[in-house]
Amino acid sequence: MNDPRVTVVVASKDRLRVLARTLPLHPRPVILVDNGSTDGTAGFVRRHFPDVHVVEAGRNLGAPGRNLGVRLAETPYVAFADDDSWWAPGALERAADVLDAHPRLAVLGARVLVGPEERLDAVSEAMRDSPLGVEPDLPGPSVLGFLAFAVVVRKEAFLEAGGFDDVIFFFGEEERLAVDLAAKGWGLAYVDEVVAHHPGS
């Protein structure tokens, strides 16, 4: 189900065949940031998914490429997805309801189910059991990290914190943003009933 409060931002490079499978699964609106693909991704998506807004970065910006999509989003919340991940039906509507109800919440970390057997991702398990506890104005355990393909962010807070910085190209970008947000007083929490899927390795 589409939700007018949430934009899905996908960053990708040379993964045309994977996108052909996952783009139909994303609620709209969707912004695809093409990080310098050479396999015809941008043209393919424009032809076959005309309702997806394609942004061509021109080169591989890595994780900070997602910032382009966030800036273009016209919704208060942004959900990230990798080119091979997708959100469960109704997940983003539920996430928007949670964010509406918790104005200090900047990052909502979802429960990730991996593979066809839908096993719980180890990072989700760690977030669920976070030693930071549950703050009274947040909807779940506080966290200082998240999985970028399974998170919904408040656009205002994300941009205020500067988004993903260009110090880290990929892998580990989440922790830097988490610390920046927490330092500004924003909340980050794991919400078990919001579900994202990943195919696994």
Image (tube, helix red, strand yellow):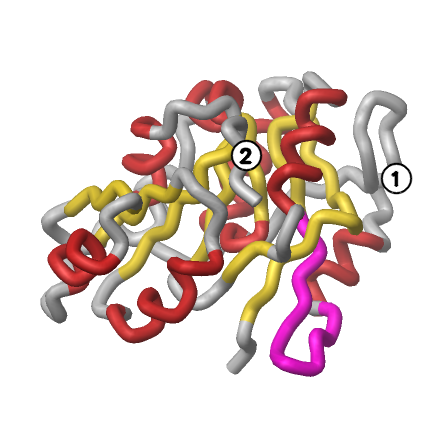
> Magenta segment: does it hold 60?
no
Separation of marks 2 and 1 at Cα, in angstroms: 30 Å
The residue range painted magenta reads: 110-120
Q: Nearer the viewer, mark 2 or mark 1?
A: 2
Q: Residues within 10 Å of mark 1 (few under 14, many from 20)?
A: few
Front-most of residues 166 and 45: 45
Residue 104: numbered disc: none
The percent coordinates of residue 77 (x first, y second) are 52, 29
Instruction: Give the quarter of the figure containing the N terminus.
Output: top right
According to the picture, the residue beneath numbered tag 2 turns out to be: 3
**90 is higher (above) or lower (below) than 186:** below
* Res 137 → quadrant: top right
Circle 1 SS class = loop
> Magenta segment: does it hold 119?
yes
Front-most of residues 198 and 176: 198
Circle 2 SS class = loop
According to the picture, the residue beneath numbered tag 1 turns out to be: 133
